[in-house]
Image (cartoon, rainbow, N blue to C red):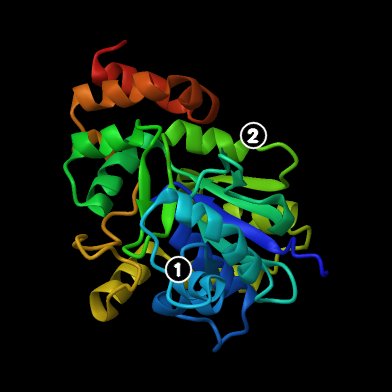
Amino acid sequence: MSDLRRIIWLASFPKSGNTWMRSLLAHYFMPPGQVPDLNNLRDFTTGDVRSDFFDAAAGGKYTGSTIEEWLKMRPKALRLIAGSKPNHHFVKTHCQTMRVGDYDLIPPDVTAAAIYIMRNPFDLAPSFARHQACDLDTAIDRMMNPDSMAGTATGIFEPLGRWDDHVNSWTSAPGLPRHVLRYEDMLANTGKAMRGLIEQFFRMPADKPKLARAVKATNFESMKKFEEKHGFAEKPSEMKAFFAKGQAGVWRDDLTPAQVGRIREAFLPTLEKFYPEMLKDTARFSGAA
């Protein structure tokens, strides 16, 4: 049997820059004129919630109602996804890399490597609240819930868990070749962040003109204008706009001191590791200083 370790996971907690990364990679690696727009990114990347692969795995229309049904079907669907292209290819996921019962959510037998994008939880919370069509406190509750779950109406699940567990599971998964990016660093200098990915992870020299075109084509305002004109197929139906702000530091305007304090207390060890520059500001803002 052929080696199916072809999937390069594009992994993140929801609203952390996954769509932006997929579009950047598409604009960099695909020939001009063949790059899919935001509503056709599936022509370049696949997702692990694609219903057509679950239908093929089930031998008919897949409609699950329990986690157990999904867990049994997921390995077969992932093997079909891995085998859908002859070489390494990108697959989006919001799942944690964890084991549930007898099943690895990110199975080694289909995995080549991963690109993990994280976003600080203070800016993430307002964006996640819009994504979930809920108030901020509920969104923060879900970010702190180890059993937090997303998914589709047909019973294809996405175990998210806590924000810190999500980050730590992907950044410390044993034996997994990975490249980790912070959304904030991508915002601050997109070209530099992508150049590091291309040269360090893909181990190839960055093509400066191609990279400049990719960065220009995928800036936040371009994506926002596209959504305003054409809509965005991946936007949850309850969500007003998928591309809302795309900025760092919005937590100062969107969160209360109590909310900042809750997030800081819940995720402090992970913040100390990945966002040490935010510790003083968030402590002062929340009154914990």
Question: In the rendered view, does 91 fall on the left or right side of 145?
Answer: right
Tell me if label 2 and label 1 are in contact, CB under 8 Å.
no
Quarter of the picture containing the C terminus is top left
Q: Earlier in the sequence, mark 2 or mark 1?
A: 2
Q: Which mark is residue 174?
A: none
Q: Position of residue 76 (x, y in %)?
A: 61, 64
Q: CA distance from mark 2 to mark 1?
A: 29 Å
Q: Position of residue 118 (x, y in %)?
A: 49, 43
Q: Residues within 10 Å of mark 1 (few under 14, many from 20)?
A: many
Question: In the rendered view, does 75 fall on the left or right side of 129?
Answer: right
**In the image shown, does 255 or 163 lie closer to the viewer?**
163
Residue at 69%, 56% (x, y): give it: 111
Is residue 54 shown above or below 110?
below
Q: Position of residue 109 (x, y in %)?
A: 73, 55
Name the residue carrying label 1: 218
Residue at 52%, 62% (x, y): give it: 48
What amino acid is found at the position of numbered circle 2 in the picture? Ser
Q: Position of residue 276 (x, y in %)?
A: 49, 24
Quarter of the picture containing the N terminus is bottom right
Residue at 30%, 68% (x, y): give it: 224
**Residue 276 visible in the picture:** no
Q: Nearer the viewer, mark 2 or mark 1?
A: 2
**Residue 131 visible in the picture:** yes
**In the image shown, does 220 or 258 lie closer to the viewer?**
258
Tell me the element at label 1.
Answer: loop
Tell me the element at label 2.
Answer: loop
Question: In the rendered view, does 289 fall on the left or right side of 174?
Answer: left
Name the residue carrying label 2: 172
Can you tell which quarter of the image residue 141 is in?
A: top left
Residue at 42%, 65% (x, y): give it: 219
Can you tell which quarter of the image residue 251 is in?
A: top left
Please identify the residue farthest to the bottom as the structure is shown: 33
